[in-house]
């Protein structure tokens, strides 16, 4: 794998018991590029993100992330990955600031980074409130802060704009959008919106890749076919 390749998968397969969640997935993504992943619920999108995040072991095939082979070398890259999943990975009985400070300690990040991120997503006024008092949109903004707190090279984003109104989406765009300069894998149910800013499009159905092409070559109608 070349030094400028962030993700290299060959024949990647993951099962849950007898059910195949991902089957024979092969792709390569250059560093700094964006892969958008489409597919109906249960297609394997979240499973793919969890494998890339080193949270699930593949059952067959090979995977190299940021130059490290999974699962054996996963420990080398965990600190270089940021994951934003449907579960916000926040402690509801801690304040917003306490949540970020806890993760900052794990990643050996200074308090100035916590302050910076709270300001950028406009949560300073609610930073001392417990997370269980937050709206869904506020929780999502805080989860974005957690995901980028340690300045990761690779972002794994599971429908990152869920629960965000247009103004909030604009706030997080510089942190997790294309202009962030990071390699990104983004799941989406929005064919037209998901293709914007993407370099490669992957379509999954039943865990199997049915579409893999440069995003500029993909028609919205071909993505819609995945959901029928």
Image (cartoon, grey):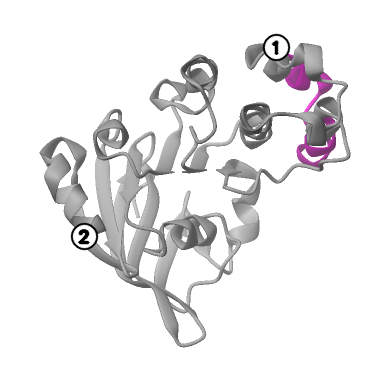
* Residue 104 within the segment the image draws in magenta: yes
Identify the element where label 1 is drawn: helix
Q: What is the crowding at mark 1: few (fewer than 14 residues within 10 Å), some, or many (at least 20)?
A: few
Q: What is the crowding at mark 2: few (fewer than 14 residues within 10 Å), some, or many (at least 20)?
A: few
Task: Please tell me the numbered disc located at residue 228.
Answer: 2
Give the residue drawn at x 43%, y 64%.
Answer: 63
Foreground of the two, 195 or 65 = 195
Q: In x, y percent, where is residue 9?
A: 36, 62
Viewer can see residue 221: yes
Identify the element where label 2 is drawn: loop
Q: In x, y percent, where is residue 25?
A: 31, 66
Identify the main secondary structure in magenta: helix
Nearer to us: label 1 or label 2? 2
Task: Please tell me the numbered disc located at residue 119.
Answer: 1
Tell me the distance, in whole angstroms, between the alpha carbons under discs 1 and 2: 43 Å
Q: Which residues are magenta?
A: 101-115
Give the residue drawn at x 59%, y 42%.
Answer: 80
Foreground of the two, 196 or 41 = 41
Image quadrant containing the N terminus: bottom left
Horizontally, is 33 left or right of 67 in the view? left
Horizontally, is 32 left or right of 104 in the view? left
Give the residue drawn at x 57%, y 67%.
Answer: 56
């Amino acid at each position: 794998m070349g030094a400028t390749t962030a993700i290299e998968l060959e024949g990647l397969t993951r099962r849950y018991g007898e059910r195949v969640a991902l089957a024979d997935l092969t792709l390569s993504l250059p560093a700094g590029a964006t892969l958008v992943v489409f597919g109906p619920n249960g297609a394997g999108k979240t499973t793919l993100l969890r494998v890339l995040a080193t949270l699930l072991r593949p059952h067959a095939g090979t995977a190299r992330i940021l130059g490290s082979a999974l699962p054996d070398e996963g420990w080398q890259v965990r600190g270089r990955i940021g994951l934003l999943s449907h579960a916000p990975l926040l402690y509801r009985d801690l304040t917003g600031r306490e949540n970020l400070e806890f993760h900052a300690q794990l990643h050996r990040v200074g308090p100035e980074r916590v302050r910076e991120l709270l300001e950028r997503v406009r949560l300073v006024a609610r930073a001392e409130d417990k997370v269980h008092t937050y709206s869904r949109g506020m929780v999502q903004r805080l989860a974005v802060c957690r995901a980028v707190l340690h300045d990761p090279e690779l972002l794994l984003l599971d429908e990152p704009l869920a629960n965000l109104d247009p103004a909030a989406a604009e706030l997080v765009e510089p942190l997790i959008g294309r202009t962030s300069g990071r390699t990104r894998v983004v799941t989406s149910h929005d064919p037209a919106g998901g293709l914007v800013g993407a370099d490669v499009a992957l379509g999954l159905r039943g865990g199997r890749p049915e579409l893999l092409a440069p995003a500029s070559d993909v028609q919205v109608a071909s993505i819609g076919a995945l959901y029928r």
